[in-house]
Amino acid sequence: MRNLFIVLFVAQACSPSSEKTAENVPETTEKKAFTFAGITASNQFDGARLNDFVQLSESAFQATISPESIPVNASAWFSFKIWSNEKKAIQLSLNYTHHKHRFIPKLSKDGKNWNSFQGQLALNHDSTTVTFNVTVSPDTLWISAQEVFSSEITYDWVDSFIALKSFISKKSAGKSVLNQDVFVVSSESEETKSSAVLIARQHPPEVPGGSIAFKSFFENIMSDSELAISFREKFNLYVFPLINPDGSDLGNWRHNANGVDLNRDWQDFTQPETQIVRDFVASKTEKEGKVISFGIDFHTSYNGPYLLILDSANEANMKTKIIPNWIEGVGDDPLNMNDYRRRDQALPYCYNWFYNQLGVEAVTLEEGDEIDRDTIRARATLYADKWMESMLASLDE
Ligand SMILES: [Zn+2]
């Protein structure tokens, strides 16, 4: 018994998690169904986040929602299923521990089709709890911060879209912290050298830009339109539809499975997910002679939509003017974001890595949390068209 104890102790001391600082160790949420008074709430699916669920009174229930690790960006992602023995109106509170409410709940009856909650949301004095009325029934209701785009759901649409496109290939570019594939989807030819890289979902909750806008953008540049076909004759495309599969499946607020914000890791490259992109791009440029011409990183902000573009000095230094021509191409279309922000490009963001290391133009495309989804899709389609036009024009500059 004593020997066994020593062995266990040594194994514990050597576990990888003991090397991390205490506040940075991601918490694992127990997968379970909570049942009170005939009402069940469950987090037993990928993308879920529900840390606890209790009954407060006969018809009032509270879900505890806490982040994977702290400190964390204020992006209180929640996602769970709820059902009851009998149809019943309840008062539901989401308690974000010490963190603030951000997302209007999205509801779904099938986990695929979603609508924003239309009723009243009551916040407590410091916005750390939101309360609303909802009707539960024996039919499962999904309640989620945004639409669920787990790795399985994301690759279901990628696979069904590319199934009819023989020019697109999909392969694993490497493994995430939890040993999931990080896929790259490519359209390329041996003779074409100019290439663009698209990256989506570094931040798990950022579904409106990171999955919905990204999907429309991707489907447009891979479409059979004349513009897309001419574009793909001149440019290879290397696309990462889900760069943080672990964080997305864990229902994380911000981080990967190591508790790291991937979009602050583009200088140190401490994480497998950022290393995968860096090494993939290096193999394309160094071994195959490809030339990266542009990078786009898809995100979502509470005050989006906007594009993060190069700072003025860097823009002035660029030989290509893809971003200014892109913005001009969108012109005064009603779908124009009308918000183009410049940042200090010393920060370890993905789009700065494109500029600082590869010497090319790049943007972070940010949609807004609660923008109407049809608007997001239409805007992404427009921006994809105008981007392809500007990319093609850059070849003549
Ligand atoms: Zn983001």
Image (spheres, grey):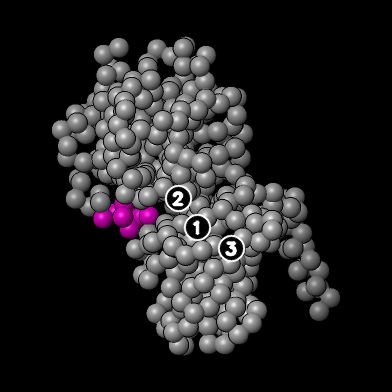
* Eye-nearest disc, 2 or 3: 3
Helix, strand or loop at label 2? It is loop
Q: Residue furthest right?
A: 2
Q: Which residue is mark 3?
A: 122
Image position of 78 with respect to 230: above or below: below
Residue 17 lies in magenta, yes or no?
no
Residue at x 69%, y 49% (from the top left corner):
71
Q: From the top left corner, tell me how far across and down residue 177 is, in percent.
A: 55, 52
Which amino acid does the dot numbered 1 rest on? Ile
The answer to the question of whether label 2 and label 1 lie on touching residues, with beta carbons closer than 8 A, is yes
Q: Which residue is mark 1?
A: 104
Question: In the shown orientation, is residue 266 left or right of residue 322?
Answer: right
Tag 3 secondary structure: strand
Question: Which residue position holds label 2?
Answer: 370
Percent position (x, y) of residue 236? 29, 31
Disc 2 to disc 3, how far (Cα)? Answer: 17 Å
The rendered magenta stretch, by its main secondary structure, is classed as helix
Quarter assignment of residue 65 = bottom right
The magenta stretch is 154-160
The residue nearer to you, when weighing 134 against 214, is: 134
Callout 1: SS: loop
Is 187 on the left or on the right of 266, as rendered? left
Pointers 2 and 3 in contact (C-beta within 8 Å): no
Vertical side of 262 occupied by 79: above or below: below
Who is closer to the viewer here, 387 or 109? Answer: 109
Q: Amino acid at mark 2?
A: Glu
Counting residues from the start of the chain, the first of labels 2 and 1 encountered is 1
